[in-house]
Amino acid sequence: MTKKRTRVTAAMAGVPADLEAANALVGEIGTLQRQIDRIDLDLSEAVAALKKQAGDDAKPLADQVKAKVAALMAFATANRETIIPAGRKSVSLSQGTIGFRLGNPTVKIAKGQDDAVVATFERLGLGRLLRREVNIDKEAILREPGTIQGLAGIGVAQVETFYVKPLDVASEQAVTTSTVTDPARLQPADAA
């Protein structure tokens, strides 16, 4: 289950007076979350069963549609010149339309041949067919956050989140408390 972010104010829930009361509150949250998880699981199982039943019911019909489309395609391919007017791609019938569509052209590069094609383009003077991109290396900036300190238009931020993770519950409740932008307080990504 994904993390659920909820805005909670002190007035919405009783604020515990001590660690023992906080522990009891975590237990209550765990009990409630397990009930929610059970409801979600029951829903998922019911939806899965309905989808399977619908798929099973629709399969014979889908097989018939597939066979009829194949039969129509064989007929249209064999009789294309006589049934589709010149300059047209389809023909309207009283029950619908049949025809042929030509898709948009796409460039296909053989698997693993990107570098060879680039080298060939460069060798043949076809550089205009190549695109070169310059991107900011955000990972490098995160490794050295002090190097950008004071530069306009860029900064490093880190969100601090309060969370509650009861025992035996897959999900946790989290609330974003603040955003840290002071480089001295930032934690490396692997320590978070």
Image (spheres, rainbow, N blue to C red):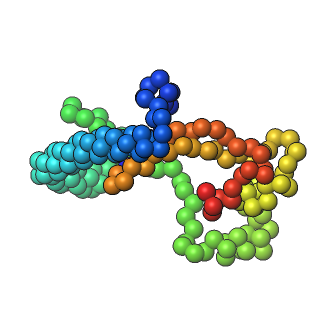
Residue visible at 16% across and 48% down?
A: 49
Image height of 159 relative to 113, above or below: above
Residue visible at 43% across and 49% down?
A: 165
| Residue 159 seen | yes
Image height of 84 relative to 56, above or below: above
Residue visible at 20% across and 45% down?
A: 42
Q: Position of residue 21 (x, y in %)?
A: 42, 40
Q: Residue furthest right?
A: 150
Residue visible at 69% across and 59% down?
A: 188
Give residue 109's quadrant in the image.
bottom right
Give residue 24's quadrant in the image.
top left
Q: Position of residue 135 (x, y in %)?
A: 75, 55
Give the camera-side residue of 136 and 75: 136
Query: Viewed as shown, does residue 70 lie left or right of 183?
Result: left
Query: Viewed as shown, does residue 109 lie left or right of 35?
Result: right
Give the camera-side residue of 137 and 63: 137
